DNA sequence: ACCTGAACACCGTTCAAGT
DNA sequence: ACCTGAACACCGTTCAAGT
């Protein structure tokens, strides 16, 4: 067994320079260590031994900062994968969603502040290549990638819970109760399909959704 | 011409009672008048002539409050509509998205705090009925409604801009520039499809997306 | 039992004033 | 020119103390 070395919570890997890249680097460190709620202008400034006003020289606002952090994280998405184009496409999308699921709050930001950085562009390029390989007409593919990524982002964003994981279960229970407590007179289908509506593991549903989206994109010509 | 009656900004339609419904009513009034950013515990308390702590007797937290407000707004969704099932289905979904687009910040909340109120249940029931009418197998319909609503919610949430509509245009420009500035060597498809990626009005794209989703849902059996 | 004042622990952003 | 102290205008949530 390795000897445990007590590390002070305050110990940090050398203070980065006060530049845009330095700020993003600190932001990611804080994100990994303490989550998105701590990635604030004030906290980052403190980490860099300055006042919050100084950050505004390099970053326009919090939203822009979050977008920059997200693009950096997108470097972790696995763009390779094995199998046919369909399987590889699903693989990339699953990897994308999984990366976002590590920080659902960031996915939430991504919905508003679309990234347009290096890693994002590479991801879109890869998705277009796979759709092309699958014989999906270019125009459909172009509109399709947007929806594919939006689905992944939204799915991750749905898990953004404000600190308290307990509430997530509460909410599901609330829906379950609402669904089973509904009158068969006024809501016959809701009643009949209550179990189907809640069925399946997150993985199964996500896999079905990706297949469904790929089928829809392949089979729906743009106007 | 009608005579203009100067109305004090402070004038209000009779202070509601300090109950859950009263709080939600005030929340909606503030939402309509000043937007979601003003729908805060503190502001609502002030509106009800009390301290913020008092609201916590009736509402668990801000997220729950937002969910309640959203369900109320969902009462405005047009569930009727004319034409075949496909057209009516698209109509309801478009209406849903449009209602959310009035308050994109609320759509953003909705992604996390799924409503489970009366109006939400009626909406889901209606969508299930339309899919059934279209001959979509029940299991596919059950998983499908989720994605249909998620798409509408996410689309509305994408428009959630923090106060400054100027930024939205900036962002689109950033993506346009990024897309056209990319090297054809490393990103050939991005370069070739740059125009397609940005093509179409929001309405056209939304219409295509709904058709695409309906096609995908109809044609993809659940495992 | 029901309600709430006051406090705790924070935010983002701006701008006048420094170096 | 570049940087920042201090201020402005807020937040959500808790809890001890009141009625």
Image (spheres, coloured by chain):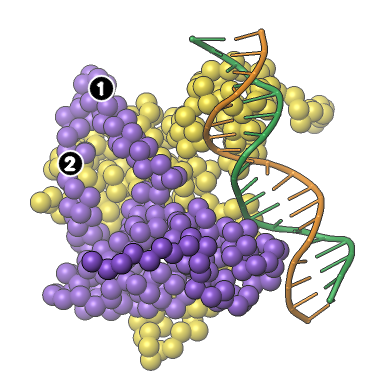
Chain colours: A purple, B yellow, C green, D orange
Instruction: Pick whichever, A149 or B216, lies toward us.
Output: A149
| Residue A199, numbered label | 2
Q: Quadrant of the N terminus of chain A?
A: bottom left
Residue A124, position in %: x, y? 36, 73
Tell me which chain the residue with mark 2 is part of.
A
Quadrant assignment for the C terminus of chain A? bottom left
Residue B48 in picture, x, y percent from top left:
65, 22
| Above or below, A185 relative to B153 | above
Q: How many marks?
A: 2
- Residue A87, percent from left and from top: 17, 69
Please tell me whether mark 1 sits on a helix, a strand or a loop.
loop
**First in sequence: mark 1 or mark 2?**
1
For label 1, the residue is A181
Report whether A37 appears left or right of B192: right
| Horizontal relation, residue B189 to residue B166: left or right | left
- Indicate the position of residue A158 as horizontal and vertical percent values: 37, 48
In the displayed structure, does residue D4 sit left or right of residue A20?
right
Q: In the figure, residue A206 lies in which quadrant? A: bottom left
**Mark number, residue B24:** none
Q: Please tell me which residue is depicted at 52% across the width and 62% down the height of the picture.
A: A10
Specify the farthest residue to the left.
B223
CA–CA distance in space, label 1 to label 2: 17 Å
Look at the image and tell me whether residue A18 can be seen: yes
Return the residue nearer the eye: A28 or A123: A28
Q: Secondary structure at mark 2?
A: loop
Residue closest to the far bottom = B185
**Residue pictured at 58% horizontal, 41% vertical:** B36
Residue sitting at x 35%, y 82%: B189
Which is more toward the observer, B193 or A36?
A36
């Amino acid at each position: 067994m390795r000897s445990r070395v007590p590390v002070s919570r305050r110990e940090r890997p050398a203070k980065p320079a006060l530049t845009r890249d330095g700020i993003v680097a600190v932001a990611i460190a804080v994100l990994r260590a303490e989550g998105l709620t701590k990635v604030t202008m004030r906290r980052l400034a403190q980490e860099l031994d300055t006042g919050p006003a100084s950050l505004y020289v390099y970053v326009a606002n919090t939203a822009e900062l979050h977008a920059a952090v997200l693009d950096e994280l997108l470097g972790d998405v696995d763009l390779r994968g094995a199998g046919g184009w369909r399987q590889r496409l699903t693989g990339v999308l699953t990897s994308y969603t999984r990366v976002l699921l590590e920080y659902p709050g960031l996915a939430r930001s991504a919905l508003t502040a679309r990234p347009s950085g290096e890693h994002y562009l590479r991801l879109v390029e890869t998705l277009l290549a796979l759709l092309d390989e699958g014989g999906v007409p270019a125009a459909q593919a172009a509109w399709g990638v947007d929806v594919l990524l939006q689905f992944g982002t939204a799915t991750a964003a749905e898990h953004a819970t404000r600190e308290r994981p307990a509430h997530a279960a509460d909410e599901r229970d609330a829906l379950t109760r609402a669904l089973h407590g509904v009158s068969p007179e006024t809501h016959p289908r809701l009643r009949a399909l209550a179990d189907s509506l809640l069925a399946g593991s997150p993985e199964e549903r996500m896999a079905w959704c990706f297949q469904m989206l790929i089928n829809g994109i392949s089979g729906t010509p743009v106007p």
